[in-house]
Image (tube, rainbow, N blue to C red):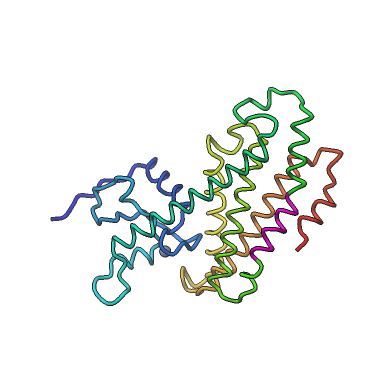
Amino acid sequence: MTKNRIPISADQAAEVMFASDRTCCVCNDRGKVVQIHHIDDDPSNNIKNNLAVLCLECHNDTQIKGGFGRKLNSDLVIKYHDEWLLRVKKRRDEADKLAVSKAFIVEPRAQKIETIPYSEERTDAILEYVNSLPSLRRELQKKAKPEWDSGVTSRMVGASYKYVDTLQGILVTLTSFYPEGNFGGDDPHKFFSELISSRYAWHRSHAEPDGPNTGGTIVNVTTSGNVVSDVEKMIEDMAQSLVGYDDRFNWREWSKLWKKM
Ligand SMILES: [Zn+2]
């Protein structure tokens, strides 16, 4: 019996994509073209737990029948899907915790910051956080470095993904110094999920002039490396916008420390 396809609403699709950070839950490679897959192969079953984000190759693997090992059955997809969603959520929760500990020193975001004419404590808190970023970056780099130096593609790429995820957490933290809604709607995680996913897609696309998946695993290395630079630059941009006007802030010194390896 063939089941009738029931279209997934745009809102639901957006929610599924966001929960998966627009990333294939099986291979976790960033920036690939992805689609929403019905885990039980029933295109009319649009309940949340039945919808997994897969790249085209991993989706093909769910269609291969027989053979050894290659076939990605629904039990495996469920396992990958659950694990990936948990990882994405954990990462966002960690960013929120950081935001609370660093940014809400003075006032909760719920208050309308723009109605407060001036608060010395608030500018102090922003400056203090921005000034802490170069050493935070160095700490994160120190953790990633053995992996980056390993020469093993999967380890290098994994370390870059993790590093970018943490930088994304810093960006989310920095938004708490802006009025609510400054970054497109209610949830800054959504804003950066879209923005950074599109950077991955951009760098993956231009790196493969012969078409998708023709560049081999090295494309993951160059793509993630390029996104590292992009996201570091985004933090620089926000730092300058937030405290560039402050006489106490030394941009030249900060940049030097920020870029130091
Ligand atoms: Zn995949």
Q: Position of residue 97 (x, y in %)?
A: 59, 42
Q: Position of residue 173 (x, y in %)?
A: 63, 42
Quick one: 77 or 208, which is closer to the camera?
77
Q: Quadrant of residue 59?
A: bottom left
Quick one: 142 or 34, which is closer to the camera?
142
The answer to if 134 sits in the magenta stretch is yes
Q: Position of residue 119 (x, y in %)?
A: 76, 27
Quick one: 45 or 76, which is closer to the camera?
76
Dividing the image into four equal quarters, which quarter contains ligand 1? Answer: bottom left
Residue at 78%, 35% (x, y): give it. Answer: 124
Q: Identify the image quadrant of the C terminus.
A: bottom right
Relative vertical location of residue 140 with respect to residue 244 in this rendering, above or below: below
Residue at 56%, 67% (x, y): give it. Answer: 157
Q: How many marks?
A: 0
Q: Position of residue 66 (x, y in %)?
A: 24, 74
Residue at 31%, 74% (x, y): give it. Answer: 69
* Range shown magenta: 133-144
The reply, left or right, for residue 54 in relation to residue 50 is right
Q: Identify the image quadrant of the N terminus.
A: bottom left
Q: Point out the residue furthest to the left here.
A: 1
